[in-house]
Amino acid sequence: MLPSTLAQDTIIALATASGHGAIAIIRLSGPEAVSIVNGVFKGKNLQAQPSHTLHFGTIRDEDKILDEVVVSLFKAPASYTKEDVVEVSCHGSPYITEQLLKLFLRKGARLAEPGEFTKRAFLNGQFDLAQAEAVADLIASDSALTHQVAMKQMRGGFSQEIKALRVQLIHFASMVELELDFSEEDVEFADRSALRRLITTLQQLITDLLKSFEMGNVLKNGVPTVIAGKPNAGKSTLLNALLREEKAIVSDIPGTTRDVIEDEAQLGGIRFRFIDTAGLRDTQDTVEAIGVARTKQQLQKASLVLYLFDVTTTLPEQLREELAALQLPQVPYLLIANKKDLATPAQLKSFAGFEHLVYLSAGTKEGLKELEQSLLEVVNANEALTGDRTIVTNLRHFQSLQKTNDALQEVLHGLDTGLTGDWLAADIRRCLFYLGEITGDITTDDLLDNIFTKFCIGK
């Protein structure tokens, strides 16, 4: 339930983006939402209408008509916040929305704080905290995969896994604590071997979730993909081809690119951040040398590396030397034999023994589709898009899972050392606490404020 101070308030906000548009929506939620709108609405008596209905009419300030509107009614508890909710669809003029907001505020509503509608939904039991956070992720999603992950979490997929873990732990915690009531009789209600098996299973599940965060973080923020190679290998041409625009200057003069050029593109529902870099070579040019140093820095931060070489001028032995000198970090990479349209069959065949090799002509875009498919295969896009695997994308969830895993390890250590039931119960309670932080079974005002202030005002 909402705190009493909040439960008495009716909040209001613009639920659509500010600025000119065909339609704008003003949202109200709270005990007086229907009566406030009904008091200025010329049409049907809204208070007498059933939930989930639409009503056409005008909004008037005394005798002045402000706009013709459609009012949507969602009566408690069958609404997003589980309170009475009214949405007023008006014409998308900033002047009109401002006049309507001022009118509703005069009639008793107050401006909503960031995320307050979703915060009320959480506090009223509409969904748990992880699902509430997924609402913000869904709004921010900009690719098929981030949308899919957010939808799964908003519909409770991740929460169900966490709650299942807690239920099993709660059972053992209760059994261990029951033993404390019979400490003088030296009995064990909790099967220690079964508890050990449970802890081991939970650790494996949590480890899988922790491992998924690396993928989830990359997918949420885009896959940092560095395009590297010698000067004139065709890196800038490839960047332009991948972006479908002339982003980088292309020239036959070696060393044209002297700084990092970065832009994003979506391939197969996944967002890639392509980073074009200065050509790797020893140079006396001060500015170009800085660019080469930045290239090496980007390589250390990359999640994926595309190493380009000119297949018409490079020998296999030279490529091996370049790769050895480059010392690619332990990240996935693709070797791209560029300018295939200009190469002889013998030149193309000479590189057949190299792994992770793609033949391409960045200039004519021949082989570009094959390269894009290879990129998706490297990041396991098909598995991520079609699998049922839960992917952790939220740093707060990741940190709580880490703490849970550490507490589980303490439980195992306690079992190994014959720790008494009271200390064992305390470690299990720590596990329950950290898991509860994820779903909101355990919350603080500071935690909720930190989460919901990152939302937009109307959500």
Image: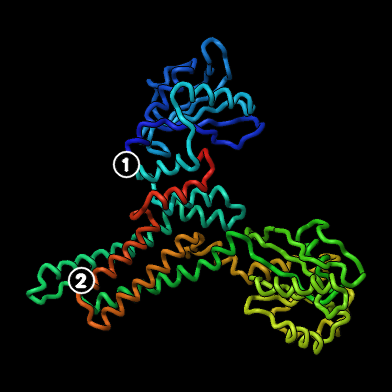
The image quadrant of residue 406 is bottom left
**Label 1 sits on residue:** 1
Position of 51 with respect to 359 (left or right) is: left
Q: Is mark 2 on a helix, strand or loop?
A: helix
**What kind of residue is marked 1?**
Met
Position of 50 with respect to 274 (left or right) is: left
Front residue of this view, candidates 110 and 209:
110
Where is 126 relative to 387, above or below? above
Of tags 2 and 1, the one toward the viewer is 2
Which residue is farthest front?
286
Residue 325: image x %, image y %? 75, 85
Which residue is farthest top?
63
Which residue is farthest right?
253
The residue sitting at 15% across, 75% down in the picture is 188
Residue 17: image x %, image y %? 60, 37
In the rendered structure, find residue 422 and report the number of the disc placed on it: 2
In the rendered structure, find residue 302 and report the number of the disc placed on it: none
Kindly tell me whether residue 220 is visible in this rendering. Answer: yes
Residue 359: image x %, image y %? 78, 75
